[in-house]
Image (cartoon, rainbow, N blue to C red):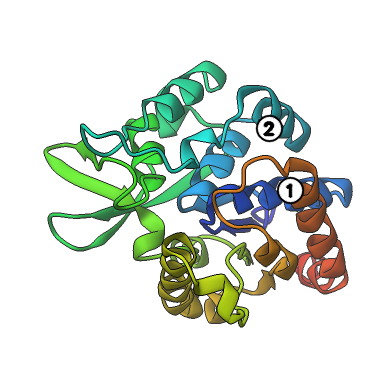
Amino acid sequence: MAAKKRIGLALSGGGARGIAHIGVLQALEDQGIFPEVISGASAGAIVGALYAAGKRPGEIMEFVRKASFFKMFKVAIPFSGLTKLTYLRDKLAEIIPEDRFESLEKQLFVAIANLNTGECEMRSSGPLFDVVTASSSIPLLFQPVEIDGQLYVDGGLLDNMPVGPLKEICDVTIAVNVMPHVEVSGKAVQNVLGIAQRCFDLSVLANSRPSMELCDLLIEPKEVHRFNIFQLNRYEPLFDIGYKAAMERMGALRELVEGLNE
């Protein structure tokens, strides 16, 4: 019997915009498409970990609503120093039974940036919660996470849409980018937060381009640009944007998936 063909899904970072990933997952499942391997950075790592743990898109969305799951993206820097992402780690422990990559139902790769070496690392084994938390630790907002004596921050800093590990083991790779490149008006960069987000967006664009070229299919919900990465109270619109973007690419995706069985 021929080996089952595998579909890989890479989920980009993007702060609160990562809620759009849940809409994409719902659209895929509605069409009978179930990725077997997931990769993610930052917000994509969070959604990816929950999905890899066997949570359905509806369950993930409900948990996000009730637990204010993305509230750790609020800008809240106390006078004592950068904020710890203890809240995120605690919430992961509430919904995912075991703190091990190996215990997940689907294979998962998480991108984390090593501050000591300056390298991007892809983790797929060992303790899970610290790695996902590290991948979500936006520099200058949250404290780095120490793992095995090294300091780690947001994986999106170096690889915001980690397609690479999927290409090695999957027959079809889908990438979802919730940090699309758009031109902005002068008003969007008139304050510190606007300038900081624009600089972050441009940096992410640069490190995402190789993945855009490497994947077999790119889903890019461009409408998410209307929401900043700290906008935490727009769950439904972001979900709907992700769902719509995935459905718009469904024809091309079906061709790829059906081609696996030929």
Identity of the residue drawn at 81% across and 70% down: 249
Which quarter of the rendering shows the C terminus? Answer: bottom right
Q: Earlier in the sequence, mark 1 or mark 2?
A: 1
Q: CA distance from mark 1 to mark 2?
A: 10 Å
Identity of the residue drawn at 52% across and 40% down: 46
Percent of width and height locating residue 250: 85, 66
Q: Please tell me whether mark 1 or mark 2 is closer to you in this view.
A: 2
- Asked whether the beta carbons under mark 1 and mark 2 sit within 8 Å of each other, the answer is yes
Q: In the figure, residue 148 lies in which quadrant?
A: top left
Q: Nearer the viewer, residue 95 or 73?
A: 73
Up the image or down, 166 lies above or below 63; here it is below
- Residue highlighted by disc 1: 25
Percent of width and height locating residue 240: 82, 51
Q: At label 2, which amino acid type do we have? A: Ile
Q: At label 1, which amino acid type do we have? A: Leu
Identity of the residue drawn at 31% across and 53% down: 139
Q: In the figure, residue 149 lies in which quadrant?
A: top left
**Residue 168 in sight here:** no
Give the number of the disc on residue 60. Answer: 2
Percent of width and height locating residue 175: 61, 65
Q: Element type at marker 2? A: helix
Q: Residues within 10 Å of mark 1 (few under 14, many from 20)?
A: many
Q: Nearer the viewer, residue 232 or 2?
A: 232
Q: Residues within 10 Å of mark 2 (few under 14, many from 20)?
A: some
